[in-house]
Amino acid sequence: FRRAMGTSMRTAALLLAHAALAAGVSVAVRPRVTVVGAGVSGLCCARTLHAAGVDVSVIERADGVGGRVRSDIVDGFILDRGFQVFLTEYPEPRSVLDLDALDLRPFLPGALVQLGAERHLVADPFRRPQDLLRGALAPVGSLVDKARVALFAVLQFLQPVDAIFAKPPRSTLAFLRAELAVSDVMIERFFRPFYQGIFLAPLDEQDARMFEFVFKMFTLGVAALPAKGLGEVPKQLARALPEDTVRTRTLVLGVSATSVRVAEVGAEKAEGAREPDDHTLESDAVVLAVDRPALAAIDGAHGAAGTDGERSSTAIYFAIDGPPPIAEPILVLNGECGRVAPGASSAVLNNVCFPSSVASSYAPAGKALASCTVVGDPAVTDAELERAVREQLGRWFGAERVAAWRHLRTYRVRYAQPTQLGARGGFDWPARLDGGLYRCGDHTSSPTLNGAMASGRRAAEAVLEDLRARGRLA
């Protein structure tokens, strides 16, 4: 009742303000903006608007904030909805978030590459000189390959980010072969599984500018996990907003440049109960902070309807009694993932890690957590997928050991990232849409946490510029 009354009063005040302005009367009513979507882009947009003195409402259909960046607690384990990491040198998160409060726990730089029953280390010679010999001897590329990658790391350290994105688009595969000039062995055994795990696409469908940008971020910083899970990132953003700014479990029934029609829904409705009444939120501006398929569903004229080329990911989690097979906080890559067709059970896994080895808080005391990533959305049942994953894990870590692992949950993230190349690719799409609406999300920027957050800020800046031009904001 209190929320409904507050909404009605704010709507009435806004209508009176518009009428007064039309009559030439000066009023001191704060401008109001509605943001549809409480993912990280929508929350960053709301944060920027609120800081500028705008009255903001954030509408979210789900039962919590975060969108694709959420975490669940299952039997005491922290399960991120799809395996993700936090890169400590992403510029946007560094400027917005309280990194100390996130209590970030780092991975070791580098990775283990699984080849058959053996694991080999790809090391960072600058930050882990003690691993230099072990990394040099690993059959993951020649010494020349590794020297070229080391030199490239130095050059990336010096290259400005703006210079990276000023380059013309081309595929990462073409860049690795022509520019970096590394062998196919190193491409297949390291770069393919590593960057396929990040961008959920084959190397020939990844933009080399994103490869360089993320490589630079790894050169400057490390990958990490927040102690309470990746879901702590949007929760921190939401806590910076006034109470009741974010309205969860709320359906969007229609949008225009100055209003959003919504209906609040409960967790469950009794049989025969009528749908809740819908109502309209009047606004000075509306921002659609949703992914591209949702944008198409809300407003097909602006959504580039369809999901062709969009990227999916599947995460399978297991509980382990006792220590994990690898105690180091490091990622394990399938160095043979390119040898057979995608989806074949012998190469179903792209990467595995044990998050509890990175942050002990991810598992109860005396237990460990295994996180297994399959790129795409395999056309099999969850039970069939679990069997295939166990089969491969058994070859890597021992069938008897893996048989004792308890399956916790499988997450199929069917729109995990937007495409990078082609008609829907590219970076920094305009925030303004025809008809007076605004948009943000990683599909308007880059398929990273950094891109999602930056897109929210840029959309807010566009709204603020237009509000000032209309005299609605000083």
Image (spheres, rainbow, N blue to C red):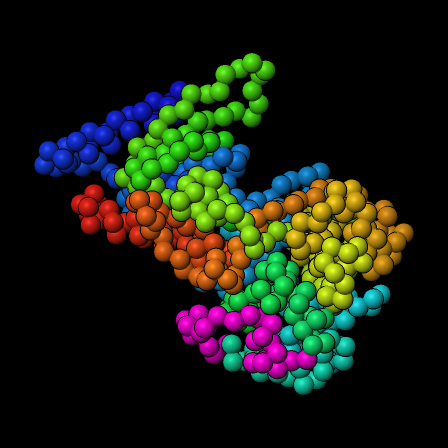
- Per the rendered image, the range of residues in magenta is 157-183
Q: Residue at x 76, y 47 (%)?
A: 385
Q: Is residue 211 visible?
A: yes
Horizontal relation, residue 453 to residue 381: left or right:
left
Q: Can residue 110 be seen here?
A: no
x then y, percent, for residue 360: 68, 51
Q: Residue furthest bottom?
A: 144
Q: Quadrant of residue 343?
A: bottom right
Report whether 393 appears left or right of 329: right
Residue 96 shown in magenta: no
Residue found farthest to the top: 272
Q: Position of residue 471 (x, y in %)?
A: 18, 45
Q: Closer to the camera, 146 or 322?
A: 146
**Residue at figure coordinates x 75%, y 42% from the top left:** 381
Position above or below: 264 against 226: above
Question: What is the residue that sits farthest to the left in this orientation?
Answer: 24
The residue positioned 61% from the left and 78% from the top of the image is 177
**Occupied quadrant, residue 179:** bottom right
The quarter of the picture where residue 204 lies is bottom right
Is residue 159 located in the magenta-colored stretch of the structure? yes
Of 181 and 353, the residue lying toward us: 181
**In the depicted view, which residue is nearer to us: 322 or 144?**
144
Residue 40 in percent (x, y) is at 47, 48
Position above or below: 132 against 312: below
Question: Is 325 on the left-hand or right-hand side of 145?
Answer: right
Residue pictured at 67% horizontal, 49% vertical? 377
Q: Is residue 143 left or right of residue 247?
A: right
Q: Quadrant of the N terminus?
A: top left
Residue 397 locus on image (x, y percent): 83, 58
